[in-house]
Image (cartoon, grey):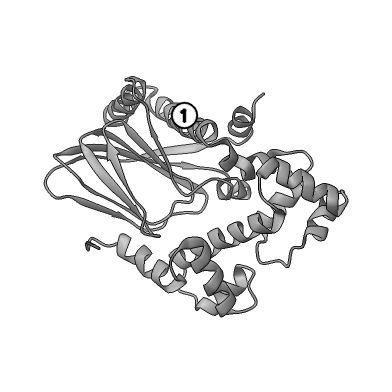
Amino acid sequence: MDLLSALLTLHELRSRIDVRCQLQGNWLRPHAAGELDAIRWHGLLDGSAHIELADGRRHPLQAGSLIMLPQSGAHRLSHAVGDARLICGSLWIAPAQRHLLAALPDILIYHEPGPWLTATLQRLYQESAEALPGSQLLCQQLSTVLLTLALRHWLTQAPTQGGLLHALMHPRLGVAIAAMLHQPEQAWSVARLAELSHQSRASFARLFRSVTGSPPLLLLTQIRMAHGAALLARESLPLAVIAERAGYASESAFHHAFVRHMGVTPGAYRRRTRLLASSESSH
């Protein structure tokens, strides 16, 4: 069985259709950061829109676009041209398997040139609105289909970006990856990670780079940055506490690493997550 099929078969997902929208005029839909074991998604059936993320990235969307947010981060959907019709939902994974979501990017955008994706979104829209016998099961299965399509597109279009996911499922690397994802605050070293994997330091480092395309400690930094960003979006803790929970000995070290990897300061990122959760415009 291939990696993606194994992943989605082993970890049963729950789903819910959250809202169906018909939007007119200069509309704006803010979304605060959500649950860490949830994947929020949006399907644009008609019209065009933009999605804005906490780090300032802004993506145009067109009819037939599917957006998956594996980190359930703060974001905002807004008007582009004309009226729009959206269906929005959530998928949940068991809390104990939350680390699987941390191995995915913060946003997946999938647009299929043919009619199949739009037809699936339309069927979901109708099933969730009519609540006919079997609708709940159909919505559950179709939501999983949407996630599968988005993940497959990501893995095939940019296979090197799937390195962390491949490593997590790898029989000789999975334990070390899971340890970093579960406890990013620990003082991990290559030697300690190699010991967890029952390999020599050199063998572990070679295998890690061949599977992920990156050295272990660079990937650890990326994991810590994602963890720090999640805390900034959801907690009102002082930056020094967040720095410690993200594995940094000082607020200054965390600040510099965050700016280097995320392109904004921790304070600016926190402010943007709050702004995206409000109805105010940042433009």
Left/right placement of residue 88 relative to residue 265 reads left
For image coordinates 54% across by 45% down, the residue present is 104
157 and 70: which is toward the camera: 157
Q: In the image, what residue type sits under mark 1?
A: Leu
Label 1: which secondary element:
helix
Could you say where residue 221 lies in the image, as x and y percent from the top left? 62, 61
Residue 244 coordinates in the image, percent (x, y): 61, 74
Whether residue 45 is situated above or below residue 79 in the rendered picture: above
Q: Is residue 187 visible?
A: yes
The answer to which of 58 and 90 lies nearer the viewer is 58
Looking at the rendered image, the quarter that the C terminus falls into is bottom left
Q: Is residue 114 above or below residue 170?
A: above
Q: Is residue 230 visible?
A: no
Give how far across and how far down residue 184 sits, in percent: 65, 62
Residue at x-position 38% and y-position 59%: 54
Which residue lies under the disc numbered 1?
A: 149
| Badge 1 density bin: few <14, some 14–19, many ≥20, Cα 10 Å | some
In the displayed structure image, the side of residue 25 where residue 63 appears, left or right: right
Where the N terminus falls, by quadrant?
Answer: top right
Q: Identify which residue is drawn at 51% across, 53% down.
A: 36
Furthest-left residue in this view: 25
Q: Position of residue 255 (x, y in %)?
A: 52, 74
Tell me how many marks there are.
1
Residue 184 lies, with reference to residue 7, above or below; the image says below
Which of the two residues, 128 or 275, is positioned nearer the viewer here?
275
2 with respect to 147 (left or right): right
Q: Name the image quarter holding residue 189.
A: bottom right
